[in-house]
Structures are given as structure tokens and as C-alpha cells.
Image: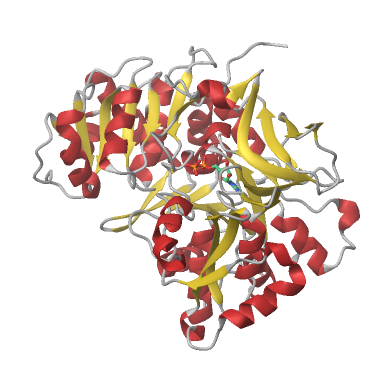
Amino acid sequence: MMQTPLLLTQMIERAEKYFPKKEIVSRTESGIQRFTYKQWGERTRRLASALEKLGVREGDKVGTLAWNHHRHLEAYFAIPCSGAVLHTINIRLSPQHVSYIVNNAEDKVLLIDSDVLPLVESIKDELTTVKAFVIMTDKEKLPETTLTPVYHYEELVAEGDPSFAFRTDLDENAPAGMCYTSATTGNPKGVIYSHRGTVLHTMALGLVDTAGVSEKDTALPVVPMFHVNAWGLPFAAVWFGTKQVLPGPYFTPKILAELMQEEKVTISAGVPTIWLGLLKELEQNKYDLSSLRYLLCGGSAAPRGMIKTFEEKYNIPFRHGYGMTETSPLTNISTTKSYQENLSKEEKLDLKAKQGILAPCLEMKVIGKEGEVKWDGKEMGELALRGPWIASEYFKDERTKDAFRDGWLYTGDVVTVDEEGNIKIVDRTKDLIKSGGEWISSVDLENALMAHEGIFEAAVVAVPSEQWQERPVACVVLKDEMKESVTKEEIYEFLKPQFAKWWLPDEILFLNEIPKTSVGKFLKRALREEIKEKIK
Ligand code: ADP
């Protein structure tokens, strides 16, 4: 067979050629803007030529600090398709982490949303490699800023060359993108995505049994474009000619529900906290979301109770996926096989709450105390992965040797595998509760708690115990309307039939909020600190 390189350039050229009339809907600071793929392609070429004029060369890193909108999508292709490297930066990280990331990646140019300016200004003196700042704004005039040299994104685009030629001669193994993990401990770790890896991952998103992204879909990525490339959806949408709806800055559940209704969104993707928020909105106001084919949920375990409410009460199907920054991200997705169609509703829900089977192209092994675990749904071990869209190292980081060994990525996630090959995440190694020589899964307890009708959110953490080493404590946020009526005793009664006695939390604390990471996951480190006082 021929050896033609797998490059992102093929995606944008396909969109321009076959889908010029298809639409990109972009919510920005000033409202909704609409572009066809033809207009977007032209703007992307103009941007690429402008970046070249600014001195960006093959292999240079260009950082973005931006929400999900059309300009970010332009950067997604202008940068890698001209041979440079798209480095998406999480705008919710601390200033110290952002400056570490920009310096570690050696970003040459930064593209910045105007509302993120204060963050970048606060670290400008620490940045050692940045030669130019480009501000993305709808306003004609640049906002006041202490950054220099600074350029107006729209002026660069206006002056750019609409027929700029993208690179078709790149090595498919050349870097196309880069992203850092959001670092719950220590500095974030960088991962480089090659053109080849991204193309193959995107192809997998098009498979019917994974995400099945198609030309007929309208996709709304809620997951930020700085969080593992919005799980690859922007690439898939461009390549397959899918209409995209980009929700922009400071969206609320109400804004999401309205966009879904008005634009007739068929697929959307986000972390569980996003969907819990949407659920709250649906309970308060009426929307027609019948266009939705599914909501894709990942990043943390999708609570079973939440899946049930979406599917049974609102008739909105759910897909539950698993992945990491290091894995592009999608590796596993929940499935019901054809011969399982006659399972009961509850059994099907149990399957959906698992993280599912491995996508084609990838390999996994699960290493327990005595080698590879049995596929019995019980024995636990650490999940290791390999394949063409799994990273092989961290960028300039000695922590590479901890996670990447013998050609495998050790995920740090403890899982079981059932007879059908579905994995179930028991916990992150560091969140597992080690009680009296046995393990307790915080994820299982959280899932059970969040299935209680009065509970909005729940996180379970380990607290030190002299007798048992560690014991679970549950932190619970009640639904507003149930705040007065739900008691601790009632929650214990609800849990008892579901767990062995020694699994039950030693304490149930009612909180107003659970601290979250920059990408909306429960921040257990902060939670442990917060509750220290309360459980003395
Ligand atoms: P960070 O490591 O900064 O949180 P990632 O988004 O890369 O950023 O997180 C990957 C981790 O998220 C996985 O290692 C796993 O622990 C968790 N995770 C991802 N998807 C799921 C899921 N569906 N169920 C449970 N945990 C998940």
C-alpha cells in the first residue's frame, strides 16, 4: 500500500472542498456569530499566513488561552497545518502553573481571549520565550494592556493571505498539538500529539460504536478546547463536515440548553458536573431537546443515577467514555452488545455506568497483585494502555519514567474487567481508600450517594485512622429543595443494603459546595483539607 502521511491538513481541505456550506455557530462576547466552513477555511488560511509573518516556523509552539469559539477553531488548524504546534492552555489554572507551562513548552506566540488578559499580564515578566501576544476580541480596538508587542487578531486575519498553502509534506509523526494535564499534585505534565496520532484518534471518533460523529450531526463540545482538545470533537467535526456549535465564554446550563434547543444539537460532550448542572436546569425549565442523539460524558465517572434520570425522565441517551490527556483522550466507551438487548433496564444502566470496552487500534492490560487480572468483574489492577494515539512520554519531564514503562502507559487508574471486557474504574490509585488491608472504592460510594433523590453532588475521601489506616468520609451537597428534609440517618439507611458494613462512611458531612479542579472534577486534595477541622 502507499505510504501517504496522515496530516491534519487533510481535514481542513476536506471540509473546504466537500462541506463549504456547512455551518459553525460561535457564541462570543458579543453574541452568536455564524460562519460557513468556506468562510472559516479562508480565515484559517489568513491566520496561518499572519502567524508566519510574525515569525512562527515549523516546530514552533503557539499557545492559546481561549474559550470554545470560531477563532480558537481557526487556531486549531492554522497552527498545525502550517507545521507549527498548537499548544492549548487551560485558562483556569493558577498563574504559576500557566507561566510554568508556557516556559516549559517554549511558546513563541500566545493567542489570548481578551478576558484572559489579566492572567497573562500578571505573569508577563516571567515568560522567557514569548515573542508576541495576539488578542482575540470582537471589539475593533485593542483593550488597554501592558503586554508587548501586542496584535489584534482580526487585523492579522484581515491582512492575511486567504489562499495560503497549508503543508502537505510534513512528517506524520511531527508534533501537531500539545496539552498539559491539569495537575492535582506538582507541576502539570505536557503531552505532545503527533499528526498521525490525532488523525487516527479522530477516525476512531467517527466509528458508530464509539462516538459515531457524522456529517448529519450537530456537535456542541462543552468540554473546553483546552481540555484534551475538547476530546477531539473539533477535529472530527471539521473532517466529517459536522455542524459545530461552540458555546463560548461564561456559559450557564441555561445557555447550553437554549443552544441545544435552537441549533438542534445532536451530540454534546462534557464532564459529569456539566451534566448535573444541565439536569438541574431541565428540572426547572422546559426545553425541547429531542434532537439529541446522545450526551457524551467522561473525565470522571458518570453517576449511574444521573444517567438514569437523563435517559428515563428526559429520554436523552447517554454515552460514557474514559480517557486521559495522555491518551488523546478516548480509549474506552460503554456499550451494550447486540446479544445484550434483552437485559433489563437496570442491567443496561449498570453497563452504562462502566467505562466500557477498548476502541479499535488500542491494547490494554490490567495488572493486579499477581500479574494480569481475571476478567471476572472483581479482581482489581492498574490499567495500562498502548496504541497509536497514546503518548509515549511527557514533554521534558523526568516523571516520564514513572508512567511510561516497557512500551506501556500506566494510567494510575485501578479498574476491574468483566467477562465482556468492560472496564470499570474503581478509583485513581491515590483516591482509593485503604481500610484494614482492603480497598474501598470512593467512586462506587459516590455513585450510590448521587442516586439518592435528595443529593445533588457527593464526593468521598479517605481520612487517616489509627485502627484501620484510612476510613471513608462522605461529603454531600443536598438539592436546594431538599435541604431541610434529608437526614444523615436516612442516607445511611439508603446505603446499607448496597454495601458491606465496613464500606459505609464513618461520617456524612453536609457541604454547600464541593471544590472542583480547573476542568470541573472533584478536587479531593482540597476537600480533605477542608474537612480536617470538621471531623476532629
Ligand atoms: P487530570 O489528570 O488533570 O484530571 P485528565 O482529563 O487527563 O486530567 O484526567 C484523566 C483521568 O480522569 C483518568 O486517569 C481517570 O482517573 C479520570 N477519568 C476519565 N474518564 C473517566 C471516567 N469515565 N470514569 C472515571 N474516571 C475517569
Q: Can residue 390 be seen in this view?
A: yes
- Figure quadrant of the N terminus: top right
Side of 104 where 198 appears, left or right: right
Q: Residue at x 58, y 39 (%)?
A: 240
- Residue sticking out furthest to the bottom: 485
Please state the horizontal and vertical placement of residue 41, each as a whole percent of the image: 40, 35
Give whichever of 79, 506 is nearer the camera: 506
Please state the horizontal and vertical placement of residue 60, each as a whole percent of the image: 34, 18
Please state the horizontal and vertical placement of residue 307, each as a whole percent of the image: 65, 65
- Figure quadrant of the C terminus: bottom left
Q: Is residue 29 above or below residue 283?
A: above
Q: Dividing the image into four equal quarters, which quarter contains ligand 1?
A: top right
Give whichever of 481, 196 is nearer the camera: 481
Side of 193 where 375 appears, left or right: right
Q: Is residue 233 above or below residue 291?
A: above
Q: Is residue 505 above or below residue 149?
A: below
Q: Residue at x 52, y 75 (%)?
A: 282
Q: Which residue is drawn at 61% across and 14% down?
A: 4
Give whichever of 88, 432 is nearer the camera: 432
Give whichever of 253, 120 is nearer the camera: 120
The coloring applied to the image is: secondary structure
Q: Can residue 261 be seen in this view?
A: no
Please state the horizontal and vertical placement of residue 88, each as a whole percent of the image: 38, 35
Rendering quarter of residue 306: bottom right
